Image (cartoon, rainbow, N blue to C red):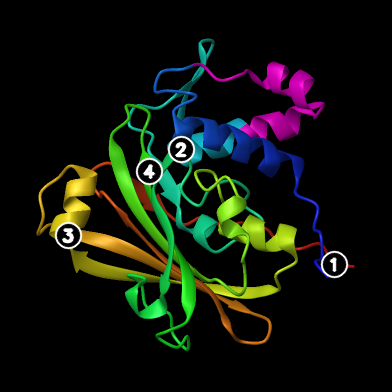
Amino acid sequence: MFLLVAVPAYLRIRTELEQQIQSGALPPGARLPTEAELQRRYSVGRATAQRVLTELAQAGLVERHRRRGTFVAEGARQENLLRLVNPTLRGPEIPGRHAVESATVVPAQDAGVDLPGVPDDTPVHQLRRLKFDSDDNPIAVELAAIPFSLAPRLSDEDLAHLTVHDYFAREGIPAAKSRVYVDPVLLDDATAARLRTEPGQAVIRLRRLTWLTGGELAEAMWHVIRPDLVEFFIEQSVLSKPHT
């Protein structure tokens, strides 16, 4: 059984706008709705609308100008690392256009990503996708592996838009926790070619492991993202919870 937690209105609206900015639907220089327009569109109060725009500005995604309005900042390509582990942050782990390069079933030992505790001969789904920015430049390579027995119908999904944690929730797969590792690595030839850049560069690889409630591995995946095109951040609320 999954416990549903209501998402605050300001966070829901902010996440929607943030995804539009990061996907390129709202490109640099685009004007955002005013506070009054947000109030009407989402049926929220002025304080909520103001908080949405203020937090987007604090994150460096938009610039606010008195009397002119709020506009998407130049180079506003930022990724919240918490999205990789937090299933309540809906949408792709890396927002934007994805393309499936390959989707196949292979032995775990050939998956291209370590699967701790999974025997080498275990069949796993191997999914490799490319992520593009608003100018259609490849900015990330993603490789994921999921035990076939856990998700035998995974290949029937729209793999270009698949979010693994969302899929687990929809299918009742009892994922319990995720952990992200930040690995400094040198860009290999194959990944560099996919990213249309030079090999041998120092890059950050974000590697995620997800486990079931019983402790079995549910997923292993990694992202390699071009550091010259993306800025990483981690953000969480520090507001005190109300006493009950």
The residue type indicated by label 4 comes to Lys
Q: Which residue is mark 1?
A: 243
Q: Secondary structure at mark 3?
A: loop
The residue type indicated by label 1 comes to His
x then y, percent, for residue 37: 70, 17
Inter-mark Cα distance, 2 to 3? 22 Å
Whether tag 2 and tag 4 are in contact, CB under 8 A, the answer is yes
x then y, percent, for residue 120: 40, 85
Q: Residue at x 41, y 78 (%)?
A: 108
First in sequence, mark 3 or 1: give its number.
Answer: 3
Inter-mark Cα distance, 3 to 1? 49 Å
Of the pair 94 and 46, the residue shown nearer to us: 94
Q: Residue at x 29, y 40 (%)?
A: 138
Magenta span of residues = 31-52
Q: Is residue 162 left or right of residue 39?
A: left
Inter-mark Cα distance, 4 to 1? 43 Å
Q: Which mark is residue 187?
A: 3
State which mark lies toward you, 4 or 1: 4
First in sequence, mark 2 or 3: give its number.
Answer: 2
- Mark 3, residues whose alpha carbon is within 10 Å: few (<14), some, or many (≥20)? many
Q: Which residue is mark 2?
A: 96
The residue type indicated by label 3 comes to Leu
